[in-house]
Amino acid sequence: MKYSLKRIGDEVFVTLRGDVTEDSEGTLNELKAKIEVARVYIDGEKVDLINSVGVRVLTAFANALRKSKISFCYSVASVALVEAFNLFIGLCNPDEVEKIAVPIHCSYCDRDGYQIYPASEVLGWSDAGITVACPHCSKGAGVTTDLDSYTYFLKG
Ligand SMILES: [Zn+2]
């Protein structure tokens, strides 16, 4: 996993990229040491994979921020992150995420992908008949996840 960090005033914008695994512990500790502000936005759109040890180190990172009274939120959470949030309660609280990637499949161009929506908006969707704009051809693509389970962690 790699990260980049940009500080603007009292806020820090972090971008995570790649796989969160046992190898990410040192990286996240280094990142935590660089955060000395009250508010952190984490862009997790490019987190491709998070394994079970990755969950543990990312939870430790989140808890360290909470303990230091640093408020953080995922400005975007990838599909891999959202799936982990649903399996491991405490990894991300409902108020710690702004937008989530929703997995989709487009039958017009036969491609899988995702679209990003505000978490609160997705929470209001029902499974029946949700179509979103395909990022490739702009036609209607179908959501390929069970929305009720996919938004489970948002329900507190
Ligand atoms: Zn398409």
Image: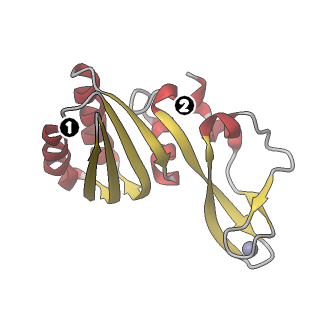
Quadrant where the image shows the N terminus = bottom left
Q: Position of residue 70 (x, y in %)?
A: 28, 26
Quadrant in which residue 92 is drawn: top left
- Is disc 1 surrounded by few (<14), some (14 to 19) or many (20+) residues within 10 Å? some
Quadrant where the image shows the C terminus = top right
Q: Which residue is situated farthest in the front direction here?
A: 9
Q: Which mark is residue 156?
A: none
Q: Position of residue 7 (x, y in %)?
A: 26, 45
Q: Amino acid at mark 1?
A: Ile
Q: Which mark is residue 153?
A: 2
Q: Secondary structure at mark 2?
A: helix
- Is disc 2 surrounded by few (<14), some (14 to 19) or many (20+) residues within 10 Å? many
Looking at the picture, does residue 130 appear above or below residue 68?
A: below
Q: Position of residue 12 (x, y in %)?
A: 30, 41
Quadrant in which residue 40 is drawn: top left
Looking at the picture, does residue 126 appear above or below residue 107?
A: above
Ligand 1 found in image quarter = bottom right
The one nearer the camera, 62 or 89, is 62
Q: What residue is shown at x 29% (from left), y 23% (from top)?
A: 66
Distance between the Cα atoms at labels 1 and 2?
A: 26 Å
Mark 1, residue position: 35
Asked if the beta carbon under badge 1 is closer than 8 A to the nearest atom of ligand 1, the reply is no
The one nearer the camera, 106 or 50, is 106
Looking at the picture, does residue 133 appear above or below residue 98?
A: below
